[in-house]
Image: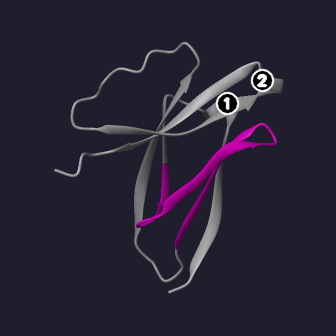
Amino acid sequence: MAKVIHKQIVDLPSLKDVVSLEMPMGAEILSVDNQHEMLAFWYMFDESEDRKEMNHFRIAGTGHKITDTPGFIFTHLGTVKFQDGYLVFHVFGISEPPF
Protein backbone atom coordinates (compact mmCIF):
# COMPACT_ATOMS: atom_id res chain seq x y z
CA MET A 1 0.00 0.00 0.00
CA ALA A 2 1.40 3.35 -1.02
CA LYS A 3 0.90 6.48 1.03
CA VAL A 4 0.43 9.97 -0.35
CA ILE A 5 0.67 13.43 1.23
CA HIS A 6 -1.95 16.11 0.56
CA LYS A 7 -2.66 19.57 1.93
CA GLN A 8 -5.77 21.54 2.82
CA ILE A 9 -5.82 25.24 3.62
CA VAL A 10 -8.12 27.51 5.62
CA ASP A 11 -7.89 31.25 5.02
CA LEU A 12 -7.84 33.56 8.02
CA PRO A 13 -11.25 35.23 7.45
CA SER A 14 -12.98 31.83 7.64
CA LEU A 15 -10.97 30.65 10.67
CA LYS A 16 -13.24 29.75 13.60
CA ASP A 17 -12.73 28.17 17.03
CA VAL A 18 -13.47 24.77 15.50
CA VAL A 19 -12.53 23.89 11.93
CA SER A 20 -13.84 20.72 10.27
CA LEU A 21 -12.11 19.25 7.21
CA GLU A 22 -13.07 16.22 5.17
CA MET A 23 -10.11 13.87 4.72
CA PRO A 24 -9.60 10.24 3.71
CA MET A 25 -10.33 7.75 6.49
CA GLY A 26 -7.27 7.24 8.70
CA ALA A 27 -5.42 10.35 7.52
CA GLU A 28 -2.45 11.25 9.73
CA ILE A 29 -1.77 14.94 10.32
CA LEU A 30 1.92 15.60 9.60
CA SER A 31 2.11 19.33 10.10
CA VAL A 32 0.17 22.56 10.47
CA ASP A 33 1.77 25.84 9.41
CA ASN A 34 1.33 29.24 7.81
CA GLN A 35 1.50 29.18 4.03
CA HIS A 36 0.90 32.55 2.37
CA GLU A 37 -1.02 33.80 5.45
CA MET A 38 -3.36 30.78 5.37
CA LEU A 39 -3.51 27.90 7.84
CA ALA A 40 -2.27 24.77 6.05
CA PHE A 41 -2.78 21.16 7.15
CA TRP A 42 -0.49 18.53 5.62
CA TYR A 43 -1.66 14.94 6.02
CA MET A 44 -0.70 11.46 4.84
CA PHE A 45 -3.05 8.62 3.94
CA ASP A 46 -3.24 5.33 2.09
CA GLU A 47 -3.87 6.26 -1.56
CA SER A 48 -6.24 3.30 -1.97
CA GLU A 49 -8.58 4.68 0.74
CA ASP A 50 -11.83 5.86 -0.86
CA ARG A 51 -13.80 6.45 2.34
CA LYS A 52 -13.88 9.96 3.82
CA GLU A 53 -14.35 11.26 7.35
CA MET A 54 -14.65 14.64 8.99
CA ASN A 55 -11.67 15.70 11.08
CA HIS A 56 -12.18 18.43 13.66
CA PHE A 57 -9.62 20.90 14.98
CA ARG A 58 -9.74 23.43 17.82
CA ILE A 59 -8.02 26.71 16.97
CA ALA A 60 -7.10 28.93 19.93
CA GLY A 61 -5.26 32.22 19.97
CA THR A 62 -2.71 32.93 22.66
CA GLY A 63 -4.59 33.99 25.81
CA HIS A 64 -7.87 32.39 24.69
CA LYS A 65 -9.62 29.98 27.06
CA ILE A 66 -9.86 26.32 26.16
CA THR A 67 -12.54 24.60 28.17
CA ASP A 68 -12.62 20.89 28.89
CA THR A 69 -15.18 19.11 26.76
CA PRO A 70 -16.29 15.85 28.38
CA GLY A 71 -15.96 12.92 26.00
CA PHE A 72 -13.32 14.49 23.76
CA ILE A 73 -9.52 14.55 23.69
CA PHE A 74 -7.54 17.58 22.45
CA THR A 75 -4.08 16.82 21.00
CA HIS A 76 -1.74 19.74 20.29
CA LEU A 77 -0.66 19.63 16.63
CA GLY A 78 1.29 22.85 16.38
CA THR A 79 1.57 26.58 16.90
CA VAL A 80 1.22 28.78 13.84
CA LYS A 81 2.26 32.44 13.51
CA PHE A 82 0.66 34.94 11.15
CA GLN A 83 1.24 38.61 10.30
CA ASP A 84 4.95 38.51 11.16
CA GLY A 85 4.26 36.84 14.51
CA TYR A 86 1.69 39.36 15.75
CA LEU A 87 -1.10 36.76 15.49
CA VAL A 88 -0.45 33.31 16.96
CA PHE A 89 -2.81 30.31 16.87
CA HIS A 90 -2.47 26.95 18.60
CA VAL A 91 -4.01 24.03 16.71
CA PHE A 92 -5.44 20.95 18.46
CA GLY A 93 -6.88 17.80 16.93
CA ILE A 94 -10.19 16.79 18.50
CA SER A 95 -10.96 13.10 18.96
CA GLU A 96 -13.18 10.91 21.06
CA PRO A 97 -11.51 8.82 23.75
CA PRO A 98 -10.70 5.23 22.74
CA PHE A 99 -12.89 3.69 25.47
- Say if the magenta span includes residue 27: yes
Q: Which residue is mark 1?
A: 13
Asked if the residue at tag 2 contacts the one at tag 1, i.e. Cβ–Cβ closer than 8 Å, the answer is: no
What predominant SS class does the magenta segment belong to?
Answer: strand
Q: Is residue 81 left or right of residue 92?
A: right
Q: Nearer the viewer, residue 90 or 37?
A: 90
Q: Residue sitting at 67 percent across and 30 percent down?
A: 13
Measured from the top left, where is residue 97 in percent x and y?
24, 46
Q: Is residue 82 left or right of residue 60?
A: right
Measured from the top left, where is residue 60 in percent x and y?
53, 25
What amino acid type is highlighted by mark number 1? Pro
Q: Which residue is mark 2?
A: 85
Q: Is residue 50 above or below residue 35?
A: below
Q: Residue sitting at 41 percent across and 21 percent down?
A: 66
Q: Residue sitting at 56 percent across and 66 percent down?
A: 44
Q: Which residues are magenta?
A: 21-45
Instruction: Please name which of the two marks, 1 or 2, marks the residue nearer to the observer.
Output: 2
**Residue most extreme to the left:** 99
